[in-house]
Image (cartoon, rainbow, N blue to C red):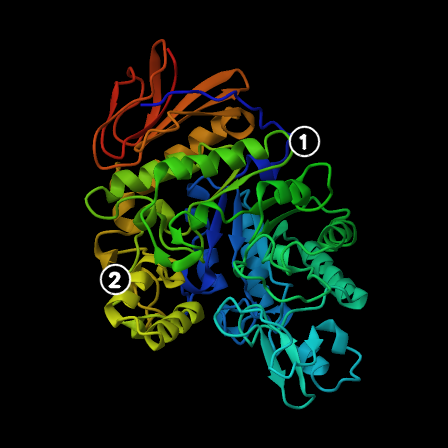
């Protein structure tokens, strides 16, 4: 075992604030709780679980998009930024939900998608009506070349990123689905409209935004081709962190957030530690934190999420350390192991078979022990696992459906395509929340919009409430532990045992405390970190606290200890 230690770095930032010390719980409204039996989760359903959310010990709830939408990409194609999707309820329902959460001390983040809109948004309907339309320049239109599209950019959901509009003979840019045309952030009128809309939401009482694909707002004005070797989200791609991105974000901070105690977290595909410091540096006046994707690509082959390889823990440690130390003292981290775009964390980073309970707890302990704001996704507190999709007919996600079609056309067998889908599909995170072992997992009295995971009969909130050793109860213990120890928020980070293929261990120090975090990322017993002196276990996923630290960690054992 290699126990070479790095120099500890202080992650303390100049200001202390609620969004640094808070724990975020992400809700995918379509799949959380259905109040009216139509098979689709809704705002009233979320409000009915406000006490449950408060019991988790979370401080902030992030709602995936709830705006009016044709749902070509489950709400990420917005047709009205200031109305609620009819399936989810009304603006009055949203106001009641925000009030219910605020009344329990929980702040609310909305998900804002302004890299693109829906093609059904009145802005785009007007934009495509004529080349002379006053809103023509609110979107990105280009004439085609003799060979076809204006350039070789590909859409995230397969195919060209350009769509020919027969009425005007020009192509519009859509880096995602054709129903999601990209907004033209170069247009000052468009930007003013976006900022005014954001201010109205703040005035309505929300506490911040998660900004979708924020690194794509500014494009290289040359609109050059992607070069050989540049993938969709390569840091050098001509639509990643374009030349005016920082200008736009500083303008947004001034025009939309000034006067509000609000925060912004940006989804940042293509971000590196270096570019992150420019986006979220505390002296920059842009974003407060961002979601980086380096860890989420740890099991991809050549950047292709549909081609997977086993996770190498040593490489995973390098990635985590790079971000923990790279932002130390200068910017703020956000930490997550899954979200609505990723598979279930226990099936990806843990063991959803024999050690499901142990590994789900271990992953929660890991995520809640890192420097930065932790994000928990709905069902993660139960140890919900990937779904056993029998066929593509079980899937709903546009990205998954497009991959399946393209894979079969390229000659990949059905079994191999479905193997990748069962591992990586976004639908894994979107199956209904498992409230009970009853029909439809207690999510709905009607037929759910996507099938319930059959394991809900044993993995559900009702059963875990009754089991003091459940993942749910451990989640509450761990959120309480983090809240009581500011060292886990503001302390330094020092990686240990960097070459060990099973043990992830690190020290957190500051606020008058020194803590040792150890997680066995394997189903075999493994030696603990080699440190001098006696240590006392403060919290563990496998047994009582208060005792001495054994020299061996059990399979998927995880614990936090302090000097005796």
Q: Position of residue 242 (x, y in %)?
A: 69, 56
Which residue is labeled 1 in the image?
15
2 vs 1, front mark: 2
Name the side, left or right, on which 113 lies relative to 312: right
From the top left corner, tell me how far across and down residue 277 is, in percent.
65, 40
On the image, numbered disc 2 is attached to which residue? 388
On the picture, is 116 further left or further right than 441? right
Nearer the observer, 465 or 353: 353
Q: Quadrant of residue 451?
A: bottom left
Name the quadrant containing residue 368: top left
Local packing at callout 1 (Cα closer than 10 Å; few below 14, some 14-19, many 20+) is few
Residue plotted at (38% across, 63% down): 427
Q: Mark 2 or mark 1: name the one nearer the start of the chain.
A: 1
Residue 350 visible? The answer is yes
Residue at 52% across, 69% down:
89
Badge 2 local density, few (<14 within 10 Å), some, or many (20+)?
A: some
Q: Quadrant of residue 529?
A: top left
Quadrant into which the C terminus falls:
top left
Q: Is residue 13 above or below residue 406?
A: above
- Name the residue located 30 percent from the left edge and 64 percent from the top edge: 452
Asked whether the viewer can see residue 383, the reply is no
């Amino acid at each position: 075992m290699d126990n070479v230690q790095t120099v500890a770095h202080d992650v303390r930032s100049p200001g202390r604030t609620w969004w640094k010390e808070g724990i975020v719980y992400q809700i995918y409204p379509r799949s959380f709780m259905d109040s009216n039996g139509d098979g689709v989760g809704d705002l009233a359903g979320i409000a009915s679980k406000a006490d449950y959310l408060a019991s988790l010990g979370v401080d902030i709830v992030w709602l995936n998009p709830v705006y009016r939408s044709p749902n070509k990409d489950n709400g990420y194609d917005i047709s009205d930024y200031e109305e609620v999707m009819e399936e989810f309820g009304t603006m009055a329902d949203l106001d009641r939900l925000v009030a219910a959460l605020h009344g329990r001390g929980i702040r609310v983040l909305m998900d804002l998608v302004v890299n693109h809109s829906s093609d059904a948004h009145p802005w785009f309907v007007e934009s495509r009506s004529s080349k002379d339309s006053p809103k023509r320049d609110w979107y990105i239109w280009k004439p085609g070349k003799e060979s076809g599209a204006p350039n070789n950019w590909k859409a995230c959901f397969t195919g060209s990123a350009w769509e020919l509009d027969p009425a005007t003979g020009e192509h519009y840019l859509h880096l995602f689905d054709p129903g999601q045309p990209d907004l033209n952030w170069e247009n000052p009128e468009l930007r003013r409209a976006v900022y005014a809309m954001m201010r109205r939401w703040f005035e309505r009482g929300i506490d911040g935004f998660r900004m979708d694909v924020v690194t794509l707002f500014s494009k290289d004005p040359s609109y050059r081709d992607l070069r050989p070797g540049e993938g969709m989200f390569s840091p050098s791609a001509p639509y990643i962190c374009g030349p005016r991105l920082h200008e736009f974000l500083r303008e947004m901070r001034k025009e939309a957030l000034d006067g509000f105690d609000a925060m912004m977290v940006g989804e940042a595909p293509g971000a590196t530690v270096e570019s992150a410091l420019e986006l979220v540096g505390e002296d920059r006046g842009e974003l407060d934190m961002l979601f980086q994707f380096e860890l989420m690509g740890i099991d991809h082959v050549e950047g292709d999420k549909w081609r997977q390889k086993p996770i190498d823990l040593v490489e995973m440690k390098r990635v985590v350390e790079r971000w923990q130390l790279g932002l130390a003292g200068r910017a703020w981290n956000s930490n997550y192991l899954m979200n609505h775009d990723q598979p279930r964390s226990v099936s990806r980073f843990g063991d959803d078979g024999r050690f499901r309970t142990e590994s789900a707890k271990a992953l929660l302990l890991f995520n809640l022990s890192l420097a930065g704001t932790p994000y928990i996704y709905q069902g993660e507190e139960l140890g919900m696992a990937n779904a056993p999709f029998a066929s593509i007919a079980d899937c709903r996600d546009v990205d998954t459906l497009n991959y399946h079609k393209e894979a079969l056309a390229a000659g990949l067998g059905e079994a191999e395509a479905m193997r990748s889908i069962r591992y990586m599909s976004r639908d894994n995170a979107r199956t209904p929340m498992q409230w009970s072992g009853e029909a439809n997992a207690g999510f709905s009295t009607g037929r759910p919009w996507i099938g319930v995971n059959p394991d809900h009969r044993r993995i559900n909130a009702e059963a875990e409430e009754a089991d003091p050793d459940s993942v749910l109860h451990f989640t509450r213990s761990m959120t309480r532990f983090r809240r009581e120890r500011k060292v886990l928020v503001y302390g330094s980070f020092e990686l240990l045992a960097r070459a060990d293929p099973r043990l992830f261990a690190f020290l957190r120090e500051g606020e008058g405390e020194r803590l040792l975090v150890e997680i066995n990322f394997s189903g075999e017993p493994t030696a603990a970190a080699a440190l001098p002196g006696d240590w006392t276990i403060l919290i563990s996923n496998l047994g009582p606290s208060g005792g001495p630290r054994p020299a061996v960690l059990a399979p998927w054992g995880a614990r936090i200890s302090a000097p005796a």
